[in-house]
Image (cartoon, rainbow, N blue to C red):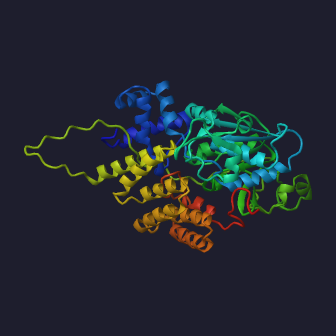
Amino acid sequence: MSEGLLDDATLAKVEEVLQGACGLTLASSLRRSLEPALSRAALSRNLTETTFLRQLLMREPAAVEAFIEHAVIGETYFFRHPEHLRALASRARLHQGGPFHVWSAGCASGEEPYSIAMALMAAGLGNGGRFRVLATDVSGRALLRAKSAVYSPWSLRRIEPDLEKRFLAPHPGASGQDAQHTVAPEVVRTVDFRRHNLATDAVPSLGFHAIFCRNVLIYFTPELVRAVLARLVGALAPGGLLFVSPAEVPLTNGMGLETLDVDGTPVLRVPLEPWTAGESAVASPRRDTQDAFAAASLRRPTPVPGSLRLEPLRPTPGPMPAYVARTPRPAPVPETPKAQVPTPASRAAQDAGLLTRALEAAHAGHFEEAEALAREAARALSPEAYLLLAMVAESRNDLYAAVEAVRKALYLEPQLALGHATLVALYNRLDRREDAERARQNALRALDGLDDEHPLRGVETTMTAGGLRQALAPRPSQMGWQGAR
């Protein structure tokens, strides 16, 4: 598969298999990951890529399973979207009665559910079984890694030092820059891992006080989004919170959810009582007295007569072409040996392969290898390669090198919105508030004229223009998951 591009007809069949198995629709920014995923899956089955692809298209269960295992594991790290964890901790402190139940749906390799448990323990809920976290994913391979509770510094790159010291310890025998860390046993004991397919399975339980389903819905078709959201909302207790990524908030319109503004962060909540026609969001004092969390300002309540009902969602952009396997034709042998000149398409495929390998090395904690591969890709003047170099530098806490790498990316692509957004986070960590605000304004200008659903260029995860606009909204505090201290 590394030698040729896959035609649209084969791609459509591969996507059909993927959608039927787990509902996944690849976004354009993830297209380049499809080809190496097929290659890795074939290798795991000790098959040639052509043979594996044939089995996959025939929907042989073992081939489909292997492909899912290598195609759906998402990028994640500890304390991602810390504003969500602040809101969760605030709500959990007010909980009375039995244990506070949280579901991490699509937990990937486990950083999210462990972060939830750490946040709740830091909020004072660590004793007497006061909370439980259920973590589910469609990938058995991801769940095995999550259960091992061992992570590289790449996963720890955004966790605050005091929380790292309290809840993580060096893995036995680990040393050096790539040393791994293990999650504290008291945190691991609070998380239950289970295999679950959001696209096809019923909810694992009811009455959750909070559900996290972030960066999952954006991979589903609009019809599946509605079905999954209906199940998630139905699994929440009255007053329960639903956390989705900023890019996914618009997908929840028409689901009968309140939108709370908590420290400048939109948090979705199932009403404590069904909304009635014409009712005001602030008209019921009983709602506030039942749950002090509702004292936060309510925005955009969706009146629903009687019970929750579904309304049509705005369609999301359809899938774009990706790579699929095709056996290349042998090139004719020239009469006189000549130096081969790579075509633009072959150079682009090579650069994409280097970036994919670099990101995989970074995920595994092999930073020297990741940096070397990213630098090789950067020789082709790839802005994404410099963004990856910035991420590697940040993971080893070399913030100045990270800033310099991002500036090189922006020199090549001045309108790279995610580059400007990365500078916002870096400058905040360096306590350069004026520079951070200037970068935020530059990022917003780079988004001018882009539709909310427009996918942005980057190396780490899918982000839309609308999602980044929400993430760049001014907030009272940017000082870590607990806010100003």
Whether residue 463 sits left or right of residue 335 in the image: it is right
State whether residue 233 appears in this view: yes
The x and y percentages for residue 130 are 83, 40
Q: Position of residue 289 (x, y in %)?
A: 92, 55
Q: Is residue 380 shown left or right of residue 84?
A: left
Count all numbered tags in the image, as a single digit.
0
Q: Is residue 441 above or below residue 20?
A: below
Residue that extends furthest to the left in the rendered view of this protein: 335
Tell me the quadrant of the picture where the C terminus can be found: bottom right
**Where, by quadrant of the figure, is residue 149 drawn?**
top right
Q: Residue at x 75, y 34 (%)?
A: 205
Relative to 319, 354 lies left or right: left
User: 48 above or below 284?
Assistant: above
Q: Is residue 148 above or below residue 367?
A: above
- Is any part of residue 253 visible from this angle? no
The quadrant of the image that shows the N terminus is top left
Q: Nearer the viewer, residue 250 or 162?
A: 162
* Rendered image quadrant of residue 468: bottom right
**The one of 284 and 466 positioned closer to us in this rendering:** 466
Is 286 located above or below residue 264 in the figure?
A: above
> Could you tell me residue 420's position as x and y percent?
52, 66
Instruction: Report whether 425 appears left or right of 483.
Output: left
Q: Which residue is found at the position 54% from the left and 56% from the top?
A: 394
**Horizontal and vertical percent for residue 82?**
68, 54
Give the image quarter of residue 236: top right
